[in-house]
Amino acid sequence: MRVVLDGVRRRLGPHALVIFVLWPLVSLGMAAVEIRALPYYQVTLAQALMGATAGVVLLARDFALVGVLALGVSTVCFATLAAVGWVPDARRRALAAEPAILFLAAYFGIALVYPTVVAHPVLTFAHGWPVVVVTAGLGVVAAAAAMARAGGLRGIGVAVTVLLIGLMVPQPVVRQWTHRAGTSGRAPLVVLGLDSLSHDDDLSALRTLASRPDGGWYTHAVTPGLLTNAVWASILLGRPVREHGIFHTFQPFPNADDTLVKRARAAGFRTVSVFPDQITCPVGSQAGFDEDRSGPIGWRQLATHLIENASLLLPVARPVLPQALLGRVPANHAGTFTYDLDRELDGIFGEGDRGGRALVLSHLTYLHHPRFPSYAELDAADRRRIWWAPAGQVRDRSFDWQDRHTRIADFELRRWKVRRLTTAVTASIERTRFLAPDRGGQLVVLADHGERVGLTPNTFWRSTYHHVPLVTVGLPLRPDLDAPISLLDVAGLIGLAPGEPARDPAVEFAVAAREHWPRLVRSMKLGWDGSVEMDPAILEQVFHGLRLHRPWPMRRPAQVQLVFASPPPVMRTGKGQPR
């Protein structure tokens, strides 16, 4: 034991240098590369480095905590190998190589579970090779490095030991979530938004849900906007875009006397927000919910999930650690390659009635954030397709909603994700007994908009963008389920707008043109809370082009209406500043 402790003490300095200095620096550099490759945000290298640095700062506690765990494993592992004579004494440079060898082995183990990690920018030189070759190569390099550190036949034992540790690294996160067989207490009233889903997608799982005796399928639901921020502002305020003026990404949720949240609280509900991805839509944290279980807003969400993915180790370690030990970023972090959709849904549907019955509003951007499937989620045929795909293509690019890249080596990613999302919703409802008679859950499922490839102010009238699914279960139904209905009527569907007339089932849209984005990005001012403030003069110009379309009866594109010829009414933001 004394020999092992002496070996640990000798290794603390060199190993700590690699783990607490080199690892965060490499993560920062790789995240900066990813930031520069983002669509929309054309940033300089200096700006990308600043953004990545901010992500490291926000996750500093997490880096430290995971680093301490890694330091313990690496020092004890190699000190023990040295004590039994498998690893010779060496200079500090050789000792510093030991945690790097373990990291390579961990990378190999993670790649056997999550194929997308082979598209990491650190492997850019190998992005043209098949996934299976790159993955095997990681294992071979880790084993060779371990054998070189040991020398002779002893190197085989060291290589086997190192690879076994690497294989164990991702296993806790694979098994860490035991899905609930049932939950006691009255179930919440849930309004669940599923980003980027339309009637052009396979909605069979949702149709099965709506076919329940207490279910309803509204066949002609119209979203009031086509950007998430505009839609959720409209739902919470009960007003169309032309009235509240929240039409673009990043705009803050305004102060208002009458919101769905305030109505729910007055009706005795405990209000809960679950908006895991708030890059462009901060309402989960700004609309005044009693409990905010949402992710970081704005640039914080972007910087932190890119840093996590670049680090490789944080996404597999953070989900198994208590949230109290971590920073503000949720343990199950949207946008990371380990994000667990089932865990998110079970937390929503499994909510109990502590402190009064809950109204949970949630918006899941699973179809719109980069969550590539793990091997365990794929069937045998799809796994084979991924194995032989070029490593650089095995990534989810759906963050860019104009990207037409949906097929990877005959694997249709979007179609797969739609099926995964919709079936996960129904499976979670069953696991948590959400609709069981003794729990009495009530549910609204909606999409804020459809897939938006090809969306412009001249094409926004197409039904694929605004004709969205709307399902209710356990709630009173409208007399005519085939009549046009706006998502502005959500408050009425859940009983928080008694006596109010049905809203205008129209869609409104305005967005900065692609050529205007560089100027808009240059005007952005970033707040430390993650907020992104844009030039109001540019936004005013964009808002002047707001267009309105009433799809039923269908109007031809020529009948699309311009709504405003003057600036929108000023609304106050959560900071008390005019928008």
Image (spheres, rainbow, N blue to C red):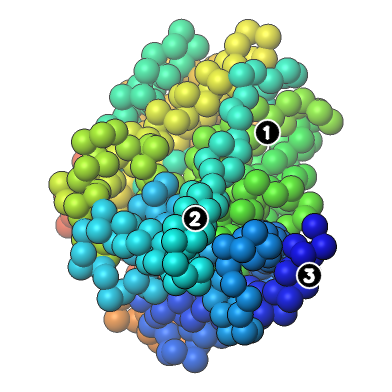
Where does residue 203 sit, x and y in percent of width and height? 31, 29
Where does residue 222 sit, x and y in percent of width and height? 37, 40
Disc number at residue 6? 3
- In the rendered image of this protein, does residue 215 appear above or below residue 402? above
Residue neighbourhood size for the residue with mark 3, other residues' Cα within 10 Å, grouped as few (<14), some (14–19), many (≥20): few
Residue type highlighted by circle 1: Leu
- Secondary element under disc 2, as helix, strand or loop, is helix
Residue neighbourhood size for the residue with mark 1, other residues' Cα within 10 Å, grouped as few (<14), some (14–19), many (≥20): many
- In the rendered image of this protein, does residue 41 appear above or below residue 291? below
Residue located at (44% from left, 61% from top): 153
Residue type highlighted by circle 2: Gly
The residue to which callout 2 is attached is: 157
The residue to which callout 1 is attached is: 359
* Residue depth check, mark 3 versus mark 1: number of the one nearer the observer: 3
Report, in whole angstroms, how far the alpha carbon at label 3 lies from the one at label 1.
Answer: 57 Å
Disc number at residue 396? none
Report, in whole angstroms, how far the alpha carbon at label 2 lies from the one at label 1.
Answer: 56 Å
- In the rendered image of this protein, does residue 392 appear above or below residue 12? above
Residue located at (70% from left, 41% from top): 272
* Residue depth check, mark 2 versus mark 1: number of the one nearer the observer: 2
Q: Which of the marked residues, 2 or 3, is nearer the chain's N terminus?
A: 3
